[in-house]
Image (cartoon, helix red, strand yellow):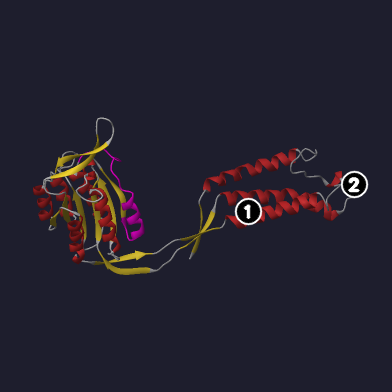
Amino acid sequence: MDNIEFLNHNYFFLLLFIPFVLIYNNYKSFTNESFFYFPQFNLIPNSNFLKVFIKKSQIWVKILSLTLIIIALARPQSVKISDETLKKEGIDIIISIDVSSSMLAEDFKPNRLEAAKNVAIDFVSNRYNDRFGIVVYAGESYTQCPLTTDHTIVKNQLKIVKDGIIEDGTAIGMGLATSVSRLKESISKSKVIILLTDGENNTGFIDPITAVDLAIESNIKVYTIGVGSIGQAPYPTLDFFGRPTYVDVDVKIDEDLLIKIAEMTDGKYFRATDNNKLIEIYNENENLEKTEIEEIKYYNKDERFEIFALIALILLFISYSLKFTFLRGI
C-alpha cells in the first residue's frame, strides 16, 4: 500500500500568493512590463485566433508551473507500508551502563567503560530475536536508545556511549528507575535489566530501593554487575605539568546494594574483575525465559518531487519557446 507524504509541507503556504500573481497580471495586462503578459483580443489587429488563444493561455501555464514547483519543494514521498507481521521468541532487555568518571580506570582493557561496551555489543550480536534498549547514568540518567529489534542501531548507540556527557557521580537509583520506565509498558513475559556499575550510590534523587519497588511492580528482573578488580585500580590523570600519568584508586563497589537489588527482583548479582569474567557473565544470561513478540515491518520511502519539478521545467520551456518563436510579434 502506497501513501503520499510531504516532508516540507510548510511550502504549501506559498500557494496563497498565486491569487496575488493573477491580480498583478490583470493589473499589468495593458503594459509590456507584466511578467505574465496577457494581451486582449481587441488590442491585436488581424491576429490569428490560435496564436491569441495560446498567448492568452500562457498565464495559466505559468501558474501551473509555479504550483508544481511548490509541490516539488514540499518534497512529496511515496511511503510503502508493509502489512507483514513477523512473530518470534525473544526478551526485552535494557542495558544500563554506569558512565561516571571512575569507569575510565584501566584494570580492564582498554578501560572499564570500553570493555563494558565491547562485551555488550557482542552480547547484542548473539541474541537475534531480543529487543534491546540502552540507558546510561552517572550523576543523572537518560535513555541512549529505546527498545528496538534493530540491533544495528543498538550496537551503533553503544559505540558512542562515553563519559563526561552528564553530571558526574553514581546515581544507581536513577539509572535503574529510567530503565524500568523503558520496560514498564512492555508486554513481554520476560523483562530484564542488566545494570552495570563500578561504584556506590552517592547521588540522585531516587533511592535505589524505590527503583527496585518500581521494577517489582512491573515484573522486571534486574541482573546487577559490579565491575572492578580487587583492591586498587590504575586511573589515568594529569600530573602537575599536565602530563598523562596514573594513580592507584581504591575499588569501592556497594556489593550489598547490588546483591539486594538482584535478590528482590529475582535476578542475580555478578562480580566482574577482568575482561574475561565480564564476558562469562554476559554468556551466563543466555537461558533467560523468552516470549513471543511481534515485529511489524513498515516503511519504504521514495522521493517523488523530481516528476513535479520536471513537468514544471518542461512547461516553462515550452512557454518561453513559444513566446520567442510562434508567438513573436503578438
Q: Mark 1 points at which residue?
A: 309
Between the C-alphas of marks 1 and 2, the distance is 37 Å
Query: Residue type at mark 2?
Result: Pro
Query: Residue type at mark 1?
Result: Ala
Q: Can residue 34 be seen in this view?
A: yes
Instruction: Name the residue furthest right.
Output: 46
Q: Residue 147 placed where, x, y %?
A: 30, 56
- Seen from the viewer's position, the closer of residues 192 and 155 is 155
Q: Residue 322 placed where, x, y %?
A: 79, 52
| Helix, strand or loop under label 1 | helix
Identify the residue shown where x is 36% and y is 56%.
153
Identify the residue shown where x is 88% and y is 50%.
47
Task: Give the left or right position of residue 216, taking residue 136 as reference.
Answer: left
Q: Mark 2 points at which residue?
A: 45
Q: Residue 115 placed where, x, y %?
A: 25, 52
- Seen from the viewer's position, the closer of residues 99 and 37 is 99
Q: Does the magenta stretch include residue 32?
A: no
Task: Give the left or right position of residue 165, taking residue 301 as reference.
Answer: left
